[in-house]
Image: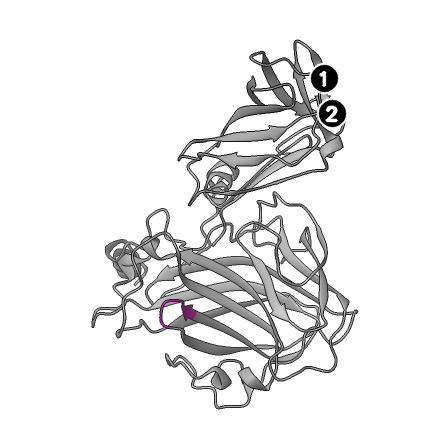
Amino acid sequence: SKAAELAALIGSGQAQGNKNLAMNGAMTINQRGTQTGVRNSYGVDRFRSTGTGAQLFTFSQSTEVPSGQGFSYSLKLDVTTADTSVAAGDYNMVQHLFEGQDLQHLKYGTSSAESLTLQFWVRSSKTGTHIVELKIQDVNYYNAQIYTIASANTWQKVTLTFSGYQTTAITNDNTNGFGINWWLMAGSTYSSGTLASNTWQNTAANRAVGQVNVVDSTDNEFYLTGVQVEIGDVATPFEHEDFGTTLAKCQRYYVKDGATYPGGSSAYKFFAAGTCVSTTSGRFTYHFPVPMRTSPTLGQSANNTLSVYSAAGAGAFSADATINSPNDLSTGLTTTLASGQTTGQGANIIANNSTAAFLEFIAEL
């Protein structure tokens, strides 16, 4: 009965909030914007393209979604350079990675290891066999299953249940312990064996047997949305999450602070406050919106899009900023400035009359 089904779900914890282990499964957060000419790159937050070969993509957030499912966005990979001659070691996949410490409740490495049910909506230009797999990073064990695209350029829902891995525990730390891989292309190194569906194994040739080549034409596109991973063998309705909660989760791994993101456009956006420690250098404090996974690396827009403003006037960046002494909630930025600043005076990093200005902090898995 429906009552019995509901009671079972409540007892298993699946009817509660935060049942979805995946982050940004509805593809609502896209801090980086559209990435062009990429093969190995994050695009829509928490999802990345990775591979080897000649293929290149435009990686973007799309409004192409399955009708009537409550989704506003999808991940889109548009092939811009095709690979029609696949070498043995060539591959391409979309990945979603997890910290090991977030998955200890799966009880992997014990006889009580939990099964996982994965569901997602997918649209591909290529019909036929597609492979999706789970990977345990620490021991390089894989569990692959087939899903079949029946009709080109048509949304379809896929639901698969994977058995738990009983042999080795996922390392309990903040490094990459686990991942989901959606294969798009696989050379013989990964496809010349025998696929053992829903079986944990560590032979590379068995991972993507039968995978069609989604990157063999610049007419091809691949869309993904509605990604949900939950404990057990029951696929429950997708857990839609508010924008702010999803953004905060994603900012643990990547923060982009720019003149046009988040929200609005400001050619003189304020980034950080600090002090001129000499006539040509400054130190500034930047506060993260959430504690990041690990000490981040820094990226920025072109130097001429940023400016340092103090009582002595505006000075342009003349060298990239570097991170100095990071901690959980803030970090020091050390910058080399154009001459003319005054030692000891307060200063601010601002956008230099440019909506292209940004700082980014990267702590991805």
Q: Nearer the viewer, residue 186 or 351?
A: 351
Q: Position of residue 4 (x, y in %)?
A: 26, 60
Relative horizontal placement of residue 43, taking residue 140 as reference (left or right): right
Q: Earlier in the sequence, mark 2 or mark 1?
A: 1
Specify the segment rendered in magenta.
135-139
Q: Quadrant of the N terminus?
A: bottom left
- For the residues labelled 2 and 1, say whether their Cβ atoms are less than 8 Å apart: yes
What main secondary structure does the magenta stretch of the protein show? loop
SS state under label 1: strand
Mark nearer the viewer, 2 or 1: 1
Q: Position of residue 233 (x, y in %)?
A: 35, 68
Q: Which mark is residue 352?
A: 2
Distance in Å between CA atoms under marks 2 and 1: 9 Å
SS state under label 2: loop
Q: Is residue 300 above or below residue 67?
A: above
Is residue 309 visible in this depiction of the protein? yes
Q: Is residue 364 above or below residue 271?
A: below
Relative horizontal placement of residue 352, taking residue 164 as reference (left or right): right
Label 2: few (<14), some or many (≥20) within 10 Å? many
Is residue 269 visible in this depiction of the protein? no
The kind of residue tagged 2 is Asn
Q: Residue at x 74, y 25 (%)?
A: 352
* Disc 1: which residue: 314
Which residue of the protein is positioned furthest toward the top in this rendering?
311
Q: Residue at x 60, y 19 (%)?
A: 278
The kind of residue tagged 1 is Ala
Which residue of the protein is positioned furthest toward the left in this rendering?
111
Q: Position of residue 307 (x, y in %)?
A: 70, 24
Q: Position of residue 74 (x, y in %)?
A: 62, 54
